[in-house]
Amino acid sequence: MGDTGMDTDVVIAGAGPTGLMLACELRLAGADVMVVERLAQRSGESRAGGIHSRTLEVLDQRGVLERFLAEGELQPVGHFSGLYLDFDESESRHPYPLMILQSAIERLLEEWAAELGVRVRRSSEVIGIEQDEDGVTVGVTAAAGAPATLRARYLVGCDGGRSTVRKLAGIDFPGTEATMTALIGDVELPDLPEDYVWVRRTPGGDYSAIAFEPGWHRVITSEFDRVVDRDEEVTFERLRESMIRVAGTDFGMRNPRWVSRFNDAARQAAQYRKGRVLLAGDAAHIHFPAGGQGLNMGVQDAVNLGWKLASVVRGQAPESLLDTYHAERHPVGERVLQNTRAQSALVRPGPQTDALREVFSSLMVFDDVNQYLRHLLTALDITYPVDGDHPLAGRRVPDADLDASDGVACVYELLHTARPVLLDLCGSAEVAAAAKGWADRVDLVEARSEDELWPVPAIGDVPAPAALLIRPDGHVAWATADASDTSALRAALATWFGPALRG
């Protein structure tokens, strides 16, 4: 950091999937980063158990997806509140969820972060925040003689639903209270019937058992109108007793690896940024973990924020760019909270809910309904507010096949370095001229599209554009069918990547 008086550009609190993904994004973009984590080592807990399509695409865009595919298993079906959904293979190269435990996800992300030079300081918890015009001083618990304060330009809280950073920053966390309690754990279930279907609803609640690896099951019990104090100790015996209450048996439950608890409380930070403090992942939003959306939303928060924060700390873009993080991601969080509240209501026991599920299930046979619910989970249809009326504007870019002189086979290969890409598909001299002012931070690529039509979820196939500007997070900042007029392109370049080079 030279003589700036800063220990690092960005301090990230929390070494979970969101914090580690953000750290990798910042390093790829050339920012210095330090992750502080209160735990001495990874917990080994596997709260999340899968990665959805859009997150798989994000990992593919960074060239690390194969690491995750090697340790997981693609699942050709998904569900909305336990009601099965069909996936559309035409919408993405990665249409199916990948079943992979969070413990493996965290290990793979930490290995990648180490390769990129991310510093992770464990046994170190944030205990104080003081902002000023130039940066933020972060008080941390000292470990092995390390400094008790860190100085950075920005602090990002990725420290979970009970985020210390959020509380110290004074950011409100409004929402709805819990109405149920769920217990979760990885255990052996020797007496589970061979014909068991993964989830069962009963008058007392519901229970599920999913085999992630031979001999072990992820079990979850949910009991409605039973809310316990959040500080009540979570034990294996409580999990076993809950299974007996709900299922009438514990299926011989034994040898727990870990147990935990969650509920259907749904809260969202009133603001994702307050000065030099930002929030991402569970620190910004908590909800009922229906459909496995939490980890995925956190990773996508990180990918949206990373390149923007790096551009600001490197002096390439104005600080106002950070305001687009809240503007773009807060509505996404609202949507997830709403659909998980609906899913929580749909699993509540009782004859009224049984009737509602039957009606809901009958509607899901219609393609439009199935598609709508599928997109709520996969996030493939997320559109950010950008200027322009092209069908691709604001949407995630499809991974179209390309014929490029440098051998690039598809669009996502262009994003491995996490830099913005101006993709010229028509050999336009006007596009090349416009790109010169941003040559230091935007890659100009000339290629030809192998596909005349590009699939866009929720819209359908659209003609391949003449040119498009792709942000590092894979969303389209500008696209056109006619590359002769580049005034809107120059405006988009300045909006998202700062002023043009002088001269």
Image: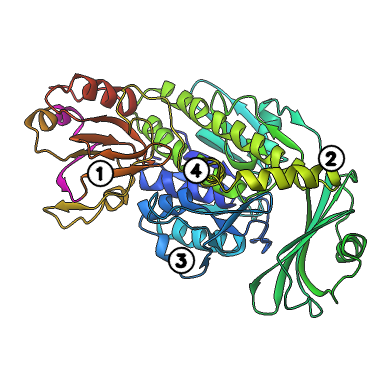
Query: Disc 2 to disc 1, how far (Cα)?
Result: 47 Å
Residue at 31% from the left image edge and 29% from the top image edge = 497
Q: Amino acid at mark 3?
A: Leu
Residue nearest the observer in this picture, 474 or 499? 474
Q: Residues within 10 Å of mark 4 (few under 14, many from 20)?
A: many
- Residue 272 visible in the picture: yes
Part of the protein shown in magenta: 434-450
Residue for badge 2: 179
Q: Earlier in the sequence, mark 4 or mark 2?
A: 2
Residue at 56% from the left image edge and 46% from the top image edge = 377
Residue for badge 4: 300
Query: Mark 1, mark 3: which one is toward the viewer?
Result: 1
Residue 40 within the segment the image draws in magenta: no
Residue for badge 1: 453
Q: Amino acid at mark 4?
A: Gln
Q: Earlier in the sequence, mark 4 or mark 1?
A: 4
Residue nearest the observer in this picture, 413 or 357? 357
Residue nearest the observer in this picture, 246 or 127? 246
Query: Disc 2 to disc 3, how far (Cα)?
Result: 36 Å
Query: Mark 2, mark 3: which one is toward the viewer?
Result: 2
Q: Amino acid at mark 2?
A: Thr
Residue 332, percent from left and from top: 55, 34
Residue for badge 3: 69
Q: Earlier in the sequence, mark 2 or mark 1?
A: 2
Where is residue 237, by image quadrant? bottom right
Q: Amino acid at mark 1?
A: Leu
